[in-house]
Image (cartoon, rainbow, N blue to C red):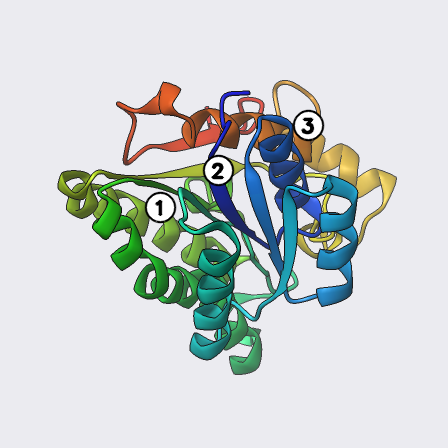
Amino acid sequence: MRLQGKTAIVTGGASGFGAGIARKFTAEGARVMVADINGEAAEAMAEELGTTAVAQTVDVSDRASVGAMAKAALAAFGHLDILVNNAGVTHLPTPLDEVSEEDFDRVFNVNMKSIYLTARALVPHMKSRRAGAILNIASTAGVSPRPRLNWYNASKGWVITATRTMAVELAPEGIRVNALNPVAGETPLLKSFLGEDTPEMRAKFLSTIPIGRFSTPEDLGNAAAFLCSDEASMITGVAMEVDGGRCI
C-alpha cells in the first residue's frame, strides 16, 4: 500500500497504459480520478476500480476542459498528490513531409500542450502544499526514433525535455517530475504504430526488443507506482525506459 492516502489524476486512464496505472494506484491505496476523453469508458473503469475512484470526461488539449478536471479533482479529494499525464495520440506511419497539418496539430495538442495546460491548472495547488509528484508518459520514440513516425517521435522528445526542465524548476517547491518511456505495448495505439497489426509486423517489431515482448499496462503501472511513491523521494528529472532493453 505504498500510495495509501494519496490522491491522483490519471489522464487517458480508461484504457491501455493509463488503465494499468489507475488499477495499480488503487491497489496501492490511492484515490484516483480516471480522466479520459471517452466519458463512458472512464465511468466503466471507475466502477471497476470501486469507491476510491471517480470518473471525469476531459479533452486534455482544451484549457477549459482541463480546468474543469482540476476543479472536479480538488472538489472530490480535497487535495492532489499525483498527476499522471498519460493521454497521448500518434499519427499513422507516414513520410514526414506527407503528415497532414490536422494530424500534426492533434499530436502537438494532445501530447505536448496538454502538459502545459495541466501544469497551469494544478502546479499552483502543488506549490501551495509544497508537495506533489508529476509523471509524464513519454516513449522510447523520444530516445530512439523510428522512421515515418517523425512528428510523434518529436512530441515525445519534447515530453522528455519538458520533464527535465519542470523537475529542475519545481524541485525547490517540493514537487518531483519524472517520465516513463514505454516501448510499444498492447494498447489501442499499437495498430497505429505498426501501420497494420499483423503477425509479421509484430514479429518484426518484437525482434528489436531484447526481452522479446511488448510493454504491458501492468509494467507501466508498477513503474509509475514506484516513481510516484515516497520511496522515490530522491528521484526527479528521470525519463525511465520500460522497454525490455529496446533503447540499449
Earlier residue among tags 3 and 2: 2
Tell me the SS state at disc 1.
Answer: helix
Residue 225: % across, % down: 51, 29
Tell me the SS state at disc 2.
Answer: strand
Residue 75: % across, % down: 48, 60
| Label 3 packing within 10 angstroms: few (<14), some (14-19), many (20+) | few
Horizontal side, residue 12 vs residue 120: left or right: right
Residue 43: % across, % down: 74, 58
The residues bearing labels 3 and 1 have C-alpha atoms spaced at a distance of 25 Å
Name above or below for residue 95 compared with residue 103.
above
| Label 1 packing within 10 angstroms: few (<14), some (14-19), many (20+) | many
In the picture of the structure, the residue carrying the numbered disc 2 is: 181
Question: Image quarter for residue 36?
Answer: bottom right
Residue 117: % across, % down: 38, 67
The residues bearing labels 3 and 2 have C-alpha atoms spaced at a distance of 18 Å
The residues bearing labels 2 and 1 have C-alpha atoms spaced at a distance of 9 Å
In terms of depth relative to the viewer, which is nearer, 233 or 95?
233
Name above or below for residue 228 compared with residue 16.
above
Residue 99 is labelled as: none
> CB under 8 Å between callouts 3 and 1?
no
> CB under 8 Å between callouts 2 and 1?
yes
Tell me the SS state at disc 3.
Answer: loop
Instruction: Count the labels in the image.
Output: 3
In the picture of the structure, the residue carrying the numbered disc 1 is: 160
- Between marks 3 and 2 in the image, the one whose residue lies nearer the viewer: 2
| Label 2 packing within 10 angstroms: few (<14), some (14-19), many (20+) | many
Earlier residue among tags 2 and 1: 1
